[in-house]
């Protein structure tokens, strides 16, 4: 899939007001979720990010865990660290899931109050679903990763304003 | 061909595997602990995943974390390097179950060779000479006395479940035996969870000579010649070379044939090294087999022109030996490797910290394998090897003079290294003449202490 095709696809989705869309073709996987965040992850070729009318997440096969390709993480971390928020980090390597099972509502949403020990999400590793608990009580400000995203050890998952 | 390989290691060997993958057009995935975030192997891999905090047990040795990383990165194979999980049969099995190809021999082979006593008996049955010793594990002090008398003192008891010098005791007469036997048992139980001991004839002045082999998955195996690794301190190799001055072409051929038939019969696949001790009469005795690529593999690569790591990958993908190694195996010239450690060259205390200046030697016949760099930090959590300097020449004289020149031009500032020690060894008449055995370093360090003392009192 080249830049032109990708641009056309995104314009089409915007025109038809499609909120979420996922496509896998060859070794390119495209997932578009239109919402508040503007997230652009550079594709494997490290070319200039595709200009988009609305938000898009382009996921090459495998994860782009090289630091240069994670602008959101750095951005979110900077902003949240400045405001004294507590970051919940992943204690294991795996895949992040925001709900207990596909289709069911997420464990938590931004705006929720959480307690120390509240289950925030699942990180799946080697077919085992590990429930990740909050280490503080407070107000859940932000979710820093998306559903189904691969996460590494120490990756920021949630920002919480402690009580 | 594999599309993606995860390297379950760090430091210079991780970089080495990345080199082979790049040349084969394979995408690489590095894993790293938080202490290795700015490592070269992370820098040069296509993807990198943090798997844990600094401690190896929680990161590089953490099997669920490593496998999880392999799964989310969707890799086809894992190269385990050396040390760490490379000889962990459980890890190899988990890879298999997770449908990830483990680049190495089948788990059963790793397990069998990991049980030292079993490995000895297997080799013995196939006609490979082993040191005279007990037939299996020794269950009591009385049995130990019986065996020692039949084999003849001095003897050594060793842990069946492990190595690295632990659970080992040299016993020189019957009076010492009971205490030393019990000490070895407890040490082995503490280190490996298994206090089983076996006994071997002990050679006072052995040479350590090992043979590199490579096998495909179709029952074909070849020996790529030997490496002489007698220059050791506390059972850790400092310097290796090939060929060994003690191995005749006839010995090389006959050991090669013997290993070929034995290892193909047990179903060995991929690279491996068979270690022998040579006694004072020049006879070789099998001690153990390492079922992985070794630190000193560049020595064999330099004399044969073969890329061993690439060969490992090709074998794992299913290529036949005659296409991985076409043509005759030739041995050209002589190669020496010096292991440069981040240690004080006289006291050997580890020297972690920031490298402020780093200049590696180059030029004809010199190769440096390293993951260190200027402004890089050597962390305190892992082994102290920071670079391998390998010199090749048309003969041993030229190899030594190239190594001396290379060591002279290797600059590392900010931490201590053993470069000065290696320069002294290269200049040492005993080393140059080839007069050494595994006790060489003890004598060398004694001599140097004496020389220093003399100089001071002069």
Image: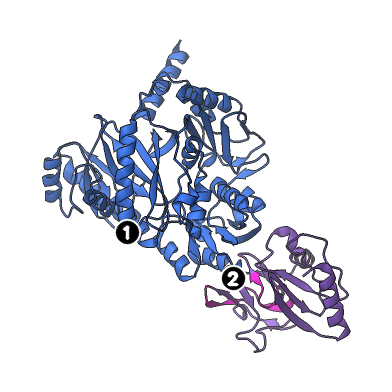
Chain colours: A purple, B blue
Which is more foreground, mark 1 or mark 2? Answer: 2
Q: Both on one chain, marks 1 and 2?
A: no
Q: Regarding mark 2 in the picture, which secondary structure is present there?
A: strand
Disc 1 and disc 2 in contact, CB within 8 angstroms: no
Q: Position of residue B80 (x, y in %)?
A: 49, 55
Q: Residue furthest bottom?
A: A104
Region rendered in magenta: A126-150
* Chain containing the residue with disc 2: A
Tell me the residue at 48%/38% (across/down).
B304
The residue nearer to you, when weighing B280 against A89, is: B280
Identity of the residue drawn at 49% across and 34% down:
B337
Relative depth, front residue between B371 and B240 = B240
Q: Position of residue B10 (x, y in %)?
A: 55, 51
Q: Is residue B297 above or below residue B337?
A: below
In the displayed structure, does residue A45 sit left or right of residue B227?
right
Residue B107 occupies quadrant: bottom left
Q: Quadrant of residue B240?
A: top left
Residue B280: percent from the left, percent from the top? Answer: 25, 29
Left or right placement of residue A61 versus residue B213 in this view? right
Q: Is residue B177 visible?
A: yes
- Circle 1 — which element? loop
Whether residue A135 is in magenta: the answer is: yes
Q: Which residue is mark 1?
A: B193
| Residue annotated with mark 2 | A94
Residue located 57% across and 75% down the image: A124
Badge 2 local density, few (<14 within 10 Å), some, or many (20+)?
many
């Amino acid at each position: 899939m080249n830049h032109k095709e990708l641009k056309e696809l995104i314009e089409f989705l915007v025109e038809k007001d499609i909120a979420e869309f996922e496509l896998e073709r060859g070794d390119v996987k495209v997932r578009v979720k239109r919402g508040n965040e503007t997230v652009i992850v550079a594709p494997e070729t490290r070319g200039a990010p595709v200009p988009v009318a609305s938000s898009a997440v382009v996921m090459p096969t495998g994860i782009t865990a090289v630091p240069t390709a994670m602008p959101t993480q750095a951005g979110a971390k900077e902003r949240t660290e400045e405001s004294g928020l507590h970051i919940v980090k992943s204690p294991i390597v795996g895949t992040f899931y925001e709900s207990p099972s596909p289709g069911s509502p997420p464990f938590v949403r931004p705006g929720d109050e959480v307690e120390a020990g509240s289950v925030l999400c699942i990180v799946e590793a080697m077919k085992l679903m590990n429930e990740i608990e909050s280490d503080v009580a407070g107000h859940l400000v932000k979710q820093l990763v998306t559903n189904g995203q691969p996460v590494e050890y120490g990756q920021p998952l949630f920002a919480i304003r402690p009580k | 061909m594999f599309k993606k390989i995860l390297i379950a290691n760090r430091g210079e060997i991780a970089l080495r595997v990345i080199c082979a993958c790049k040349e084969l057009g394979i995408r690489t995935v590095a894993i790293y602990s938080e202490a290795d975030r700015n490592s070269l192997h992370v820098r040069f891999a296509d993807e990198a995943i943090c798997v844990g905090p600094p401690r190896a047990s929680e990161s590089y040795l953490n099997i669920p974390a490593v496998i999880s990383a392999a799964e989310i990165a969707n890799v086809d194979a894992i190269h385990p390097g050396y040390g760490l999980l490379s000889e962990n049969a459980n890890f190899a099995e988990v890879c298999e179950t997770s449908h990830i190809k483990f680049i190495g021999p089948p788990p059963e082979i790793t397990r069998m060779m990991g049980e030292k006593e079993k490995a000895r008996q297997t080799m013995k049955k196939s006609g490979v000479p082993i040191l005279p010793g007990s037939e299996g594990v020794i269950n009591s002090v009385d049995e130990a006395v019986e065996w020692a008398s039949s084999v003849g003192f001095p003897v050594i008891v060793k842990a069946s479940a492990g190595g690295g010098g632990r659970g080992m005791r040299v016993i020189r007469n019957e009076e010492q035996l009971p205490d030393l036997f019990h000490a070895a048992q407890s040490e082995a139980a503490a280190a490996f969870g298994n206090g089983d001991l076996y006994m071997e004839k002990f050679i006072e002045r052995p040479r350590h000579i090992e043979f590199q082999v490579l096998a495909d998955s179709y029952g074909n195996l070849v020996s790529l010649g030997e490496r002489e690794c007698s220059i050791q301190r506390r059972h850790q190799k400092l310097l290796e070379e090939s060929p060994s001055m003690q191995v005749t072409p006839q010995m090389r051929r006959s050991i090669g044939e013997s290993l070929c038939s034995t290892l193909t019969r047990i179903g060995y696949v991929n690279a491996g090294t068979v270690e022998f001790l040579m006694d004072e009469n020049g006879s070789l005795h099998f001690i153990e087999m390492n079922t992985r690529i070794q630190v000193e593999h560049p020595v064999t690569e330099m004399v044969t022109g073969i890329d061993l790591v690439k060969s490992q990958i090709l074998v794992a993908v299913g290529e036949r030996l005659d296409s991985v190694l076409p043509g005759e195996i030739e041995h050209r010239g002589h190669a020496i490797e010096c292991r440069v450690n981040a240690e004080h060259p006289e006291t050997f205390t580890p020297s972690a910290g920031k490298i402020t200046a780093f200049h590696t030697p180059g030029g004809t016949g010199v190769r440096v394998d390293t993951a260190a760099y200027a402004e890089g930090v050597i962390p305190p959590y892992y082994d102290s090897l920071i670079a391998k300097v390998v010199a090749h020449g048309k003969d041993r004289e030229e190899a030594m003079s190239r190594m001396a020149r290379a060591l002279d031009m290797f600059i590392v500032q900010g931490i201590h290294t053993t470069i000065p020690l290696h320069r002294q060894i290269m200049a040492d008449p005993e080393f140059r003449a080839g007069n050494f055995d595994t006790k060489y370093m003890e004598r060398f360090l004694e001599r140097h202490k004496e020389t220093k003392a003399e100089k001071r009192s002069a």
